[in-house]
Image (tube, rainbow, N blue to C red):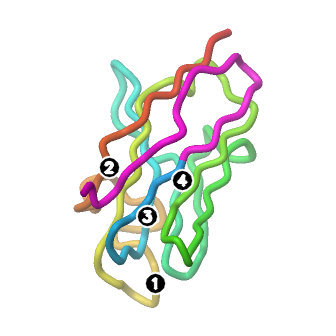
Amino acid sequence: QAQLSESGGGSVQAGGSLRLSCAAAKTTYCMGWFRQIPGKEREGVAYYDARRITTYAGSVQGRFTIDKDHRENILYLLMDDLKPEDSGMYYCAAQLQYYDGGRCYGGPRPSGDYFPLWGQGTQVTVSS
């Protein structure tokens, strides 16, 4: 069984919405959604720390919402007003240790190097 399992990707037209889900099979603390766009570096787009505080990349601020169902241990990413430049492979990632009052280890928007656990990814394609 995968320890992080994403779903919800797909193809939509610009301006549309998608909701990604990431089911965690073990206890997690800081979690994040990252995306990999061909030809670009991996980007952290949204974070949810153990204090339930969320942080976003400027490119998605106001359009994406990260949330977590603590009972089911599922992390969500609701993506509204999608743009073609949002197309890419989306991954959820998790930190497995509690850190500094619930903050993410590595800062408010840590790079992927600070996350030891990753899902397999789900593809998002936005057409113009």
- Assess disc 2: are there few (<14), some (14-19) or many (≥20) residues with their C-alpha within 10 Å of its C-alpha: many
Disc nearer the start of the sequence (1/2): 1
Q: Residue at x 24, y 57 (%)?
A: 1
Q: Earlier in the sequence, mark 3 or mark 2?
A: 3
Q: Nearer the viewer, mark 1 or mark 3?
A: 3
For marks 3 and 4, give the CA distance: 9 Å
Q: Which residue is mark 1?
A: 102
Q: Nearer the viewer, mark 1 or mark 2?
A: 2
Query: Quadrant of residue 110 in the image?
Result: bottom left
Compared to 36, does 112 lie above or below?
A: below
Which of marks 1 and 4 precedes in the sequence? 4
Q: Which mark is residue 31?
A: 3
Amino acid at the residue labelled 1 = Gly
Asked whether residue 18 is drawn in magenta, I would say yes
Amino acid type indicated by mark 4: Ala
Picture coordinates of residue 18 (x, y %)? 65, 36
Cα–Cα gap, marks 2 and 4: 15 Å
Where is mark 4, residue-wise? 46
Which residue position holds label 2?
Answer: 119
Q: Which residue corresponds to the image point at 66% horizontal and 23% vertical from the top-left?
A: 83
Nearer the observer, 12 or 55: 12
Query: Counting residues from the N terminus, which is met first, the one under dot 2 or under dot 4?
Result: 4
Q: State the separation of the CA atoms marked 3 and 2.
A: 11 Å
The foreground one among 17 and 84 is: 17
Q: Kindly report which numbered mark, 3 or 2, lies closer to the viewer in this rendering.
A: 2
| Point 41% across, 68% down: residue | 107
The magenta span reads 1-20
